[in-house]
Amino acid sequence: MARVSRGGTSRGGMSRNAGSDVRAAYLFIAPAIIGFTVFVAYPLVRSFVLSLTRDNGLTDPVFVGLGNFRRLFTVDPAFWPSLRATGYLVVLYVPLSLALGLALAMFCNQRFAGVRVVRTLAYLPVVLPAVATITLWKFILNPQVGLLNTILDKLHLPTSSWLASPTMSMPSIVIVMLWGVGGTMIIFLAALQAVPTELYEAARVDGAGSASVFWRITMPMISPIMLLQVILQTTAALQTFNQPKILTGGGPGFSTNVLMLSIYNNGFSNLGRVPQLGYASAQVWVLFVIIIAVIALTAKFSSLWTYSDNTPD
């Protein structure tokens, strides 16, 4: 057995070196731990404590227990419509963003002259200022003088009220959100380029068609990235705020009053009324639980449709 000397060394000073390595490791991870504590853990705990109070930010908060949650589910007439609007947005946006992003990626994965220009143009909306592009879309979707209705009218196609219509307002917001699908396209493009070309060559030798190659090679090989995209796009859709805030303000009616916008209105502006910070915090926790549940369910059933080298035959 190795003896530990008074100086804390054994077998050529390994213990002292190990202690030094541990201290260095703590120093390296300290910024991440401090950042997580200050910007994630503390706000999380603080918001939960706030959700148990009636707090307007002007007077001392009053403890109400689960009163805010009870009011949320049984009294507030805007909560369930906002939840339905959020669900409608997720159901409409996530499949479309994945399909369009994958289609763009497969197109940009081809070899043709100018492919780099096409990739740049597809990704360009992602780097443009979000507020500026959303404001531009507000003009494009204007039912009276908007560019989209003008083009449809010239083509003798039916026009729409778009953002002013209770039925078309949410699809219009989804159209604006799909404007930034270039980020999804880039991730899919990287996944497609990582698929071994030997698999495609072997499939061609066996006489496989395009559809067979796509469903039997491409989709299984990129399925882990598809899983990542499902989680990322669903989480982003659940937290959508900029588009409904700028384009519709939540209207007409409650058709686009998604949960994040409702949280903002209750916690900050609320049309000049006194802020309800405690109530808004309760809404934040409902949204947090929904996001965690969606991610957990997606991860739990991911093995049913994702391919892995460790998947048993």
Image: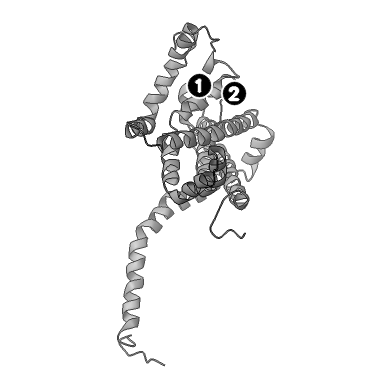
Q: Which mark is residue 126?
A: none
Q: Is residue 281 visible?
A: no
Rendered view: 278 above or below 165: below
CA neighbours of label 2 inside 10 A, class few (<14), some (14 to 19), many (20+): many
CA neighbours of label 1 inside 10 A, class few (<14), some (14 to 19), many (20+): some
Q: Which mark is residue 255?
A: 2
The three-letter code of the residue at mark 1 reads Thr
Mark 2 and mark 1: Cα distance apart in space: 9 Å
Rendered view: 253 above or below 85: above
Rendered view: 143 above or below 223: above
Q: Is residue 74 visible?
A: yes
**Relative image position of residue 196 (x, y in whole percent):** 44, 51
Which of the marked residues, 2 or 1, is nearer the chain's N terminus?
Answer: 1
Residue holding disc 1: 248
Q: Give the camera-side residue of 158 and 115.
A: 115
- Asked if residue 267 lies left or right of residue 12, the reply is right
Residue extending farthest right: 74
Color theme of the render: one colour
Rendered view: 200 above or below 86: below
Identify the residue at image location x=35%, y=82%. 15
Q: Looking at the rendering, in which quadrant would you find the C terminus?
A: bottom right
SS of the residue under disc 1: loop
Q: Looking at the rendering, in which quadrant would you find the N terminus?
A: bottom left
Identify the residue at image location x=35%, y=30%. 121
Identify the residue at image location x=40%, y=58%. 33
Q: Quadrant of residue 230?
A: top right
Count of numbered badges drawn on the protein? 2
